[in-house]
Image: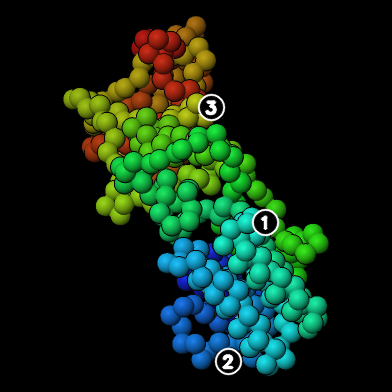
Amino acid sequence: MKVLITGAKGFIGKNLVAQLNNIKEGKAKHNSLGSALTLFEFDKDTDPSLLDEYCQKADFVFHLAGVNRPKEQSEFMEGNFGFTSDLLDTLKKHNNNCPIMLSSSIQAELDNPYGESKKAGEDLLLKYGKETGAKVYIYRFPNVFGKWCRPNYNSAVATFCHNIAHDLPVQVNDPNHPMTLVYIDDVVQELINCLVGNPNKEGDYCKVATEHQIKLGEIVELIKSFKESRTTLQVPNLSDSITKKLYSTYLSYLPEDSFSYPLKMNVDERGSFTEFLKSPDRGQVSINISKPGITKGQHWHHTKNEKFLVVSGTGVIRFRKINEPSEIIEYHVSGEKLEVVDIPVGYTHNIENLGNTDMVTVMWVNEVFDPEHPDTFFLPV
């Protein structure tokens, strides 16, 4: 299948091309598509003469090219209507009635130059479909967000992510302003569904199945919390779909010299203990380093429970049920054989480094440490 993509270097186009190439190269599976895909990428810096060749050969057209922020208002109509007209005329020239998808906007319903130009493009395509019998798919996208979207252009989410990640101020005039968002991966999946003849269509228009309703102020507060998570170590609530997608988006705007961040290491003569991640409902993860011959622990818990995973070095984890002092249980652990050891409640326990090098243990506990209620009671094994 030969696919023409106009606006191939734009936000949606770039993401669509990347996923179609993944499918073409076998890196992503799709039941109806595969290595036979050929992509014709057309953008504003493409040789204009190639449009004629692409329109002659295409089996499907994704028309994503458009104008959002022109210098003159007249450019709205030229870019969103004029180029659409040229594209359709070129398809007609070659009697190519292949399906065509148009990227429009919810602003097509509004009385402004941008909306009027988008509506004009829609009407032109609907007329084209009736005249030629070609299948036409019009998507009135709401606010699309995700990686590779240009900040300070036409996406509030991209601007917020970029500015907060770069310690720049953000301006929110109305925190209660409602926003309808669609995530770029959901958009791309819908476009691929459209390509194989299974669009989410009602009447003349198509839409992305998954939309998110959220207030503008809530978006900003979430993104700020993502930045603060490097200090608080709190993992965002990734069971919430919009939070998960916004967090992935935010990370894509980090400055390239700021991908890493330091952790506070609590160091003494025995080694170190460092908190890594925290979650209100999934506990916390820490990294424990023990020097050779060192024993740590010697305590028990009522409700708090842990999992130990030695990833480097050699040691032993010992347990004793607190009301059975004569019986000690031992589990030998090593980075040579990754094995998780559960630490049940009601057992006092310790971990000793038996090797000649530092022993590194990943420790998970079911609750974030609360100094007011530590649920930790000293008792030698």
At 41% across and 36% down in the image, what residue appears?
224
- Distance, label 3 to label 1, CA atoms, is 43 Å
Q: In this view, does 196 lie above or below 181?
A: below
> Around disc 1, counting alpha carbons within 10 Å, would you say few (fewer than 14), some (14 to 19), or many (20 or more)?
few
Query: In this rendering, does residue 194 appear at all?
Result: no
Residue 73 x, y percent position in the rendering = 49, 66
Residue 116 x, y percent position in the rendering = 62, 64
Q: Is residue 343 above or below residue 60?
A: above
Residue 323 x, y percent position in the rendering = 50, 6
- Quadrant where the N terminus sits is bottom right
Along the polypeptide, which appears first: circle 1 or circle 2?
2
At 53% across and 27% down in the image, what residue appears?
281
Describe the element under mark 1 as helix, strand or loop: helix
Q: In this view, does 362 lie to the left or right of 49?
A: left
Q: Name the residue under label 2.
A: 53
- Distance, label 2 to label 3, CA atoms, is 57 Å
Q: Looking at the rendering, which quadrant does residue 285 occupy? A: top left
Amino acid, disc 2 = Glu
- Distance, label 1 to label 2, CA atoms, is 34 Å
Q: Mark 1 points at which residue?
A: 109
Q: Name the residue under label 3.
A: 281
Which of the two discs, 3 and 1, sits closer to the camera?
A: 1
